[in-house]
Image: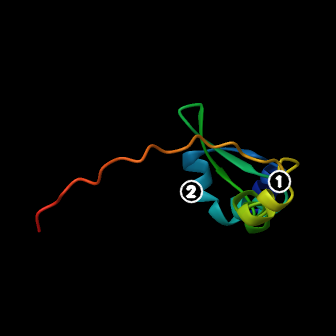
Amino acid sequence: MTANVLKKTKGKSNWQLQEAKAMFSEVVKEAGLKPQIITVRGKEKAVIISFEEYKKLSSPKQTLFNFIQNSPLRDMELELPLRRAEKMREVSL
């Protein structure tokens, strides 16, 4: 790859699919700096992001347990309706 081509792609963040395939290693390097958008026929179709960014986006901010524990409604009493005592149905086994 020539220095001239690398100079043109440095800092680029939008790539046509064919261009991204031909210069995939450069796309991946640039993804370490900022998301790289891949277009097909002028329409945005995919984004390549760094692994660190992926981990931030895909990991839960907190566990469900912590969410419930930190809820401002945690000590609120729930008033649940009483269940009717219904006759159990018979099931043949």
* Residue 14: quarter of image: top right
Where is residue 11 shown, x and y percent of the image? Answer: 85, 51
Q: Which amino acid type corresponds to the residue marked 1 in the rendered image?
A: Arg
Report the residue marked by disc 1: 74
Answer whether residue 45 is visible to the viewer in this image.
yes
Quick one: 5 or 23, which is closer to the camera?
A: 23
Disc marking residue 64: none
Quarter-of-image position of residue 40:
top right
Q: Which residue is drawn at 67% across and 66% down?
A: 25
Camera-nearest label, 1 or 2: 1
Q: Circle 2: is it few (<14), some (14-19), or many (20+) Cα within 10 Å?
A: few
Residue at 58% x, 58% y is: 22
Q: Please indicate whether residue 22 sits to the left or right of residue 37 in the image.
A: left
Q: Name the residue under label 2.
A: 21
Q: Quadrant of residue 5?
A: bottom right
In three-dimensional space, the C-alpha distance between marks 1 and 2, rounded to whole angstroms, equals 52 Å
Image coordinates of residue 50 in percent, x first then y, are: 75, 63
How many numbered discs? 2
Identify the amino acid type marked 2: Lys
Disc on the earlier residue, 1 or 2: 2
Helix, strand or loop status at disc 1: loop
Judge left or right: residue 56 versus residue 16: right
The quarter of the rendered structure image containing the C terminus is bottom left
Q: Nearer the viewer, residue 77 or 26?
A: 77
Q: Residue at x 54, y 48 (%)?
A: 18
